[in-house]
Image (tube, grey):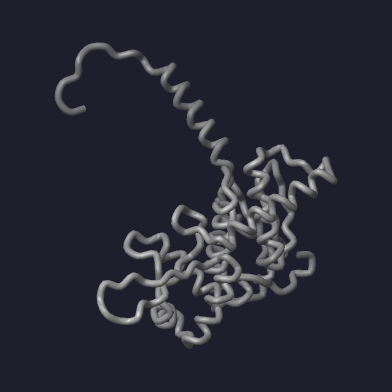
């Protein structure tokens, strides 16, 4: 985003960021992955109507999943909300459709511009297609380095915001990127946001889990070859 203009999409409002942060945290807990509007209101201090409006926009964007509570007692079932992380059981049909459409558009562009083809595999390329469209939808102009697996989003549009809000903003932004990568399906993961020299700097590091797995397998094979062979019978506990 050359001019550092306003951000759109799921991180355009810090209230929306706070809601997403709570839902992502709930999704990573072992007890309960869903929250109610009342719980989100209590945690944020926002009015129920405001929370409903934010949730509706997040649902329409494919970032939140609503489900109706299954009750075994009398009473009106509540609507529960969870983050669409792209993991099994937490996938949004809106996000899936976005990822498929991004892949189709990416294929079309590469057919017209052969030099734009990536050295990454097909799945990773489709992941980047989806991620770039998500970032553009959010108001960024991402610069992707296929070899270094980095995405430069400088200048950060949140640079002028409150410094105490940055950790939550960066974490939610990273969680959203990982969700998009999960929905597209492939080996790439959003690893971290690089430490910034200037507040306006923003570079996201991706990781190719396939390459990491190959490296680990190679080390294990080397270690096995170097390990002396032991003979005999072992009794009892090691």
Q: Position of residue 25 (x, y in %)?
A: 43, 65
Q: Position of residue 236 (x, y in %)?
A: 14, 25
Q: Position of residue 59 (x, y in %)?
A: 55, 70
Residue appearing at x 66%, y 47% in the figure: 126
The vertical placement of 125 against 156, above or below, is: above
Q: Residue furthest left?
A: 236
Where the C terminus falls, by quadrant?
A: top left
Q: Nearer the viewer, residue 178 or 233?
A: 178
Q: Nearer the viewer, residue 210 or 73?
A: 73
In this rendering, position of residue 235 left or right of residue 231: left
Q: Nearer the viewer, residue 92 or 163?
A: 92
Residue 79, picture quadrant: bottom left
The vertical placement of 165 against 211, above or below, is: below
Residue 163, picture quadrant: bottom right
Total numbered badges shown on the rendered structure: 0
Where the N terminus falls, by quadrant?
A: bottom right
Residue appearing at x 79%, y 69% in the figure: 3
Residue appearing at x 48%, y 27% in the figure: 219
The vertical placement of 151 against 39, above or below, is: above
Q: Residue furthest right?
A: 112
Q: Position of residue 88 (x, y in %)?
A: 46, 53
In this rendering, position of residue 155 left or right of residue 75: right
Residue appearing at x 65%, y 46% in the figure: 149
Q: Nearer the viewer, residue 87 or 171?
A: 87
């Amino acid at each position: 985003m050359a001019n550092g203009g306003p951000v759109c999409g799921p991180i355009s409002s810090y209230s929306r960021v706070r809601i997403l942060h709570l839902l992502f945290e709930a999704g990573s807990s072992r007890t309960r992955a869903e929250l109610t509007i009342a719980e989100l209101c209590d945690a944020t201090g926002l009015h129920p109507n405001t929370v409903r409006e934010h949730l509706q926009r997040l649902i329409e964007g494919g970032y939140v999943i609503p489900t109706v509570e299954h009750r075994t007692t009398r009473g009106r079932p509540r609507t529960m909300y969870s983050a669409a992380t792209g993991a099994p059981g937490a996938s949004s049909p809106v996000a899936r459709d976005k990822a498929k459409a991004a892949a189709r558009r990416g294929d079309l562009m590469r057919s017209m511009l052969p030099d734009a083809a990536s050295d990454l595999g097909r799945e990773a390329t489709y992941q980047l297609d989806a991620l770039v469209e998500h970032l553009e939808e959010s108001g960024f102009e991402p610069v992707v380095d296929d070899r270094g697996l980095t995405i430069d989003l400088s200048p950060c549009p949140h640079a002028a915001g409150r410094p105490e809000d940055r950790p939550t903003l960066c974490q939610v932004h990273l969680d959203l990127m990982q969700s998009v990568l999960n929905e597209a399906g492939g080996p790439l993961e959003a690893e971290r946001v690089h430490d910034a020299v200037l507040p306006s700097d923003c570079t996201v590091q991706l990781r190719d889990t396939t390459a990491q797995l190959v490296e680990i397998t190679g080390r294990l094979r080397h270690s096995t070859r170097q390990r002396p062979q032991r003979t005999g019978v072992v009794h009892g506990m090691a």
